[in-house]
Image (cartoon, grey):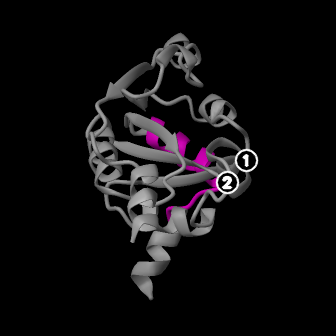
Amino acid sequence: MEKYYFIQEKISDVISLQYQLSEYRFKDQKIVFTDGCYDLLHRGHIKFLAQASDLGDKLIVGIHSDSSASQKKGRGRPVQDHKTRAIILASLQFVDHVIIFEEDTPLKLIQMIHPDILVKGSDRLIYDTAGTELVPSKGGKIVTLDVLKGYSVSSLLEKIKAL
């Protein structure tokens, strides 16, 4: 039960995250932020998040709420509710915090966090991504990581439907 409690503690709300951020900044730790739906965790997600965590000291992952994910991904999505997706991500040792956001984009979250590094997948158009103007203006940088080809939730769902 103790380990499960520790995992749940990694799922943050805005107020507790702000407290942690001030502590990390006091210790001069580099804060990395990325976001997504993370509906059905797969090998591509794991590789991406592990690489993102290597870029700094603390990795914060923002995930779309159920309503936000449904709006972004369409009918029938997400497959798993945001509480389930959050606990799965929080169980990864290289993820320090998971925070659920309701908006279409994580811009408000990025404004609050002011990450040193904002990480996006190379499959995303950088000029059309939330935070790409804000982060550099605050002294941070944008890093794109290659996505692992052949791995996506959509392809995984297609395989399941074909069974």
As shown in the figure, which amino acid type bears the numbered disc 2?
Answer: Ser
Query: Which residue is located at x 50 percent, y 68 percent?
Result: 87
The reply to whether callout 1 and callout 2 are in contact (CB within 8 Å) is: yes
Q: Is residue 70 magenta?
A: no
What label sits on residue 69 in the rendered view? none
Vertical order, 136 against 123 (above or below): above
Above or below, comparing residue 11 to residue 145 in the picture: below
Q: Which residue range is magenta in the image?
A: 10-25
Q: Residue at x 66, y 48 (%)?
A: 74
Q: Quadrant of the C terminus?
A: bottom left
Task: Say which label, 1 or 2, has the lower sequence index.
Answer: 2
Dividing the picture into quadrants, the one containing residue 76 is bottom right
Left or right, residue 130 beside residue 26:
right
Which secondary structure class fits the magenta region best? helix
Q: Which residue is mark 1?
A: 102
In the image, residue 52 sits, relative to residue 139, either above or below, namely below
Q: Nearer the viewer, residue 84 or 56?
A: 84
Residue 65 is tagged as 2
Q: Position of residue 45 (x, y in %)?
A: 35, 50
